[in-house]
Image (tube, rainbow, N blue to C red):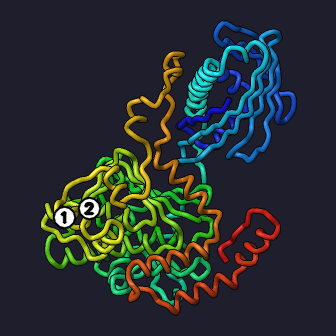
Amino acid sequence: MEMAGEARLQASRELVWDALNDPSVLQASIPGCESLERTADNEFTATVVSKVGPIKARFAGKVTLSNITAPKSYTLTGEGSGGAAGFARADIEVSLDALEPTVTLLRYGVKANVGGKLAQLGSRMIDAAARKSADDFFALFEKQVDGLAATAAPAVNGAAFDVEALMMPVTEEPVVVNAPAVAMPAAALAAQADFAPSAPAAHAPHLVPPAAVQPSAAGYQAEVMDVLMSEKIKVWISDQVAVVTLNRPNSRNAMTYAMWLALPSIMAALDRNPDVRAVILTGAGKDFCAGADIPEFEKVRADVAQATAYEVAVDACCDAIAKISKPTIAVLRGYCLGGGAHLAMSCDFRFAAYDAMFGIPAARLSIIYGVKGTRKLLSLVGLPQAKRILYGAQRFDAAHALRIGFVDQVAGSAAEKDGTSTSIWERIFGAKRRPADGDPMAEARAFATSLAGNAPLSMGGAKYLLNGMAMGTGVLDLARSEALIAAAAGSDDYREGRAAFAEKREPKFQGR
C-alpha cells in the first residue's frame, strides 16, 4: 500500500521539526497510542491500539528514524505485531518546506505492508483505514503544534534581510562589466538596453542609496525609507531562496511610488548575496498586486512631467527584476492587474493560483501601457492576444492565462476546491478532506529549490542570452555574451561540475 499527503502548519519549520522528534507530541498525535518511549537517539518503543474493520488489536513494536537531514526531512519506520491480528510495517518519508517564516508545509509519503488477519480484509478497507489514521494523526499533530507555537518565543525560519545595508552610503566606485548596475538612476536605466542583467555577484556594484534610484525623487527619500523600515516590502531568505513580498494587503498590495523606487535596491542586494540562488516575488494576503496605487496619482502623477517620471520609475523597477542574474518566479494569487501584471511579466516564471485574476485596464484609464511592459506582454502571448488584452481592458482568469501563455503553471483545480477529489471509500469511512496540492507558493518553492542546485553562472548567462534574443538581436551584446560564456568555462564551478560528473555525485556550485 502506498499513499501521500500534506499538511499546512502555522509554525516555523524549526518548531515543527522539534515537534516531530518529541515523544510526548508524537504520542498525543498517534491515534490509539498508549505509550511511546525513547530507547536511543533515533529509536522509540511504542504500544498502539488500532481497529481496522472488525479487527481490533494492541500492537507492540518500535519506531526508528533514519535519513535525517535536520530540519528538512527524515524517514520514519514503524514495525509492530498485534499477535493473532497480524503484523504491520510502514516506511514514512517526511519532509518540511518553509513556505513563510511561520508557515510550514509538511509532506509525507507512506509505503506499508500488513500480514495475518489484517491482510485478509482487502486492500480497499486497509487503504481507507490507513488514510483515516493519517488524517487523524495530522489533525492531532496540528493541534499540538498550534499549542507549542502559542507559547514559544518568536522564531524565524531562514535569514534576516539586512535593511540597513540598503541605506549605507556608497564608499567605492561601482564596478560594472559592460552592463548597467541594477540600482542605477532610473533615467540612465531607461536609456540602456532591455534585459541586460546586472554584473555577476563577484563583480556586483555597491548599492546606490534609494534616494538616487530616481533623480527627481529626492523629495520621496523619506517615503522610500518608510517602505523599507515598515516592511511594505518584506524580504525573507531560506534554503537559498529569497521571497520578496509586497505587503499592503488592505490595498490589494497596490504599488506606491515609493515602492516602485525601493524595489530596485532590494533586487540589487539580492543579486549580490551569494546565499541567494533564486527569488520569488509575491503579495501578502489574498492578492499579488492590483497595480499602481491610483489614489495617490493626484500627488505623484498630476501632470505630464510627473506622469513621465512615474513611468520611468515603473520601468526601472521592472527592469531590476528582469535584469537580476538569478531565476525569478512570480507567485500569483487574487488580483494581478496593470502594474502588477508588469511586475509578474518581468519575472522568469509565473505560478498562479486557480482563482487568480488578470487584466491590464489601461484603456479604462486613458493610459497607454508602457513600451517595456507591452513588449513583455507581446513576447508572452503573441500579437492577437496582446491586442485583445490591451484593447479590451477586460479581466481573464488563470485557466485562460495558462492557455495563452501569460502564466506557466496553475496550481489547484475546481475539483479540489469543492472536495470532489476525495474518493468514495474515503467518504464512506469518514476520512477528512486533505489539503489540495494547489498551493502556488509550495510549487514555486519546490521549483526554485530545484534550480538553486544548478550552476549560478550558467543560469545567469542563459538568462542574459535568452532575454536578449527574445527582445531582438539589437538588444543582445555579443561581446558581453562571449565574455559570460568564457567566464563560465574558466570558473571553479565548471571544474566542480566535471569532477562531480566523473565521481557520480551531486555538484556543489559556489557561483565563481
Q: In the rendered view, would you say 472 is above or below 252? A: below
Q: Classify residue 37 as left or right of residue 511.
A: right
Residue 342: % across, % down:
32, 66
**Along the horizontal axis of the image, is 252 left or right of 499?**
left
Measuring 62% from the left and 23% from the top, which residue is drawn there? 127
Q: Please identify the quadrant where the N terminus is shown.
A: top right
Question: In the picture shown, does residue 212 fall above or below 422?
Answer: below
Query: Which residue is tagged 2?
Result: 338
Residue named by callout 1:
362
Q: Picture quarter containing residue 121?
A: top right
Q: Examine the rendered structure and indicate whether residue 254 appears above or below residue 264.
A: above
Q: Nearer the viewer, residue 483 or 103?
A: 483
* Above-or-below relation of 344 to 127: below
Question: Which residue is most to the bottom?
Answer: 479
The answer, for residue 297, to whether it is visible in the render is no
Name the residue nearer the viewer: 156 or 109: 109
Kindly identify the residue that appears in the image at 48 percent across and 49 percent down.
Answer: 441
Discs 1, 2 touching: Cβ within 8 Å: yes
Q: Position of residue 218 (x, y in %)?
A: 31, 77
Q: Residue at x 18, y 59 (%)?
A: 393
The number of numbered badges drawn on the structure is 2
